[in-house]
């Protein structure tokens, strides 16, 4: 069965520090998709990135970057020069590709606290 | 552009009372729709999904039910709430590609059952 593990429950950093959020997944599918979502204090989940299993290129979007490594089944998320507005809970998720519809399996989330 | 609405934003209900949460999507047709629950300090659990009007699949047996009376409307209901129904309820939609769809979430409803 698919599983997503976010071992870091909470991370605290000071503004301008770099921080990496870990995500390790388990799946037997050869085709799968990975996602990151941000949940600010307001509660709404904000989509950040989607990556398919055939694309191992790292991606950078502004201060955000993602490192996808199939060899270690990891999809880690790095925030460079963190800001207070980055404070949120971040969820990693994995799609199940064998059910005919899109089902996401979420990790338990990592709470990031960025202090000024 | 697509938007998703949920109401109410917050709700406090007594045990044993009925529940109706509504979710509507604008700017897209025939979306897949989802209901998730997030218990305090925990991850998200998929409750129901729908691939079309009147088509509902339940992921977890529970005290809740869902309905999709219109293409872009998804309703979560209960006849009698339990304390354990408290949580943050999120509705989501995706383009019906089948695999790898990105799900976009609404603002959520925070339900407290007393």
Image: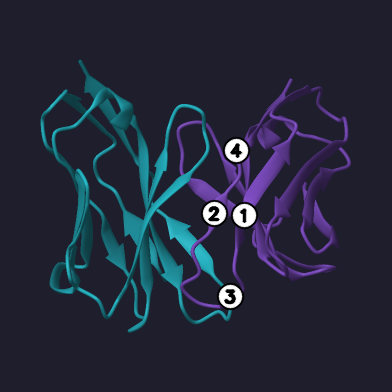
Frontmost residue, B101 versus A100: B101
Q: Which element is circle 1 on?
A: loop
The chain identifier of the residue carrying mark 1 reads: B
**Distance in Å between CA atoms under marks 2 and 1:** 9 Å
Residue hosting label 2: B104
Question: Quick check: do tags 3 and 2 share a chain?
Answer: no
User: Are marks 2 and 1 in one subunit?
Assistant: yes
Tags 4 and 3 touching, CB below 8 Å: no
* Position of B11 relative to A78 (above/below): above
Q: CA distance from mark 4 to mark 2?
A: 10 Å
CA distance separating discs 4 and 3: 23 Å
> Which of the labelled discs sits on residue B2, or is there none?
1
Q: Colour of chain A?
A: cyan
Return the x and y of residue B94 as percentages of the image width and height: 59, 64
Q: For mark 3, what is the residue?
A: A101
Subunit that carries the residue with mark 2: B
Q: Identify the coloring.
A: by chain
Can you say whether B16 is above or below A76 in the image?
above
Question: Which element type, helix, strand or loop, lies under badge 2?
Answer: strand
What residue is pinned by disc 4? B107
Residue ID at (43%, 32%): A40
Q: Quadrant of residue B74?
A: bottom right
Chain that is coloured purple in the picture: B
């Amino acid at each position: 069965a698919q599983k997503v593990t976010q071992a870091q429950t909470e991370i605290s950093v000071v503004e301008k520090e770099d921080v990496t959020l870990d995500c390790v997944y388990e799946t037997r599918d050869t085709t799968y998709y990975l996602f990151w979502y941000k949940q600010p204090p307001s509660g709404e989940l904000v989509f950040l990135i989607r990556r398919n299993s055939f694309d191992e290129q790292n991606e950078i979007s502004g201060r955000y970057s993602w490192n996808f490594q199939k060899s270690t089944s990891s999809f880690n998320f790095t925030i460079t020069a963190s800001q207070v507005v980055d404070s949120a809970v971040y969820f990693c998720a994995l799609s199940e590709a064998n059910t005919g519809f899109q089902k996401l399996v979420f990790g338990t989330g990592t709470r990031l606290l960025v202090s000024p | 552009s697509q938007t998703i609405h949920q109401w109410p934003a917050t709700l406090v209900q007594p045990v044993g009372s009925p529940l109706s949460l509504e979710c509507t999507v604008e700017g897209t047709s025939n979306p897949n729709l989802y209901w998730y629950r997030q218990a305090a300090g925990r991850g998200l659990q998929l409750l129901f999904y729908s691939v079309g009007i009147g088509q509902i699949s339940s992921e977890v047996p529970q005290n809740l039910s869902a309905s999709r009376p219109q293409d872009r409307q998804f309703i979560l209901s209960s006849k009698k709430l339990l304390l354990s129904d408290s949580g943050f309820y999120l509705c989501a939609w995706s383009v019906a590609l089948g695999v790898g769809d990105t799900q976009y979430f609404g603002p959520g409803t925070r339900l407290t059952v007393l």
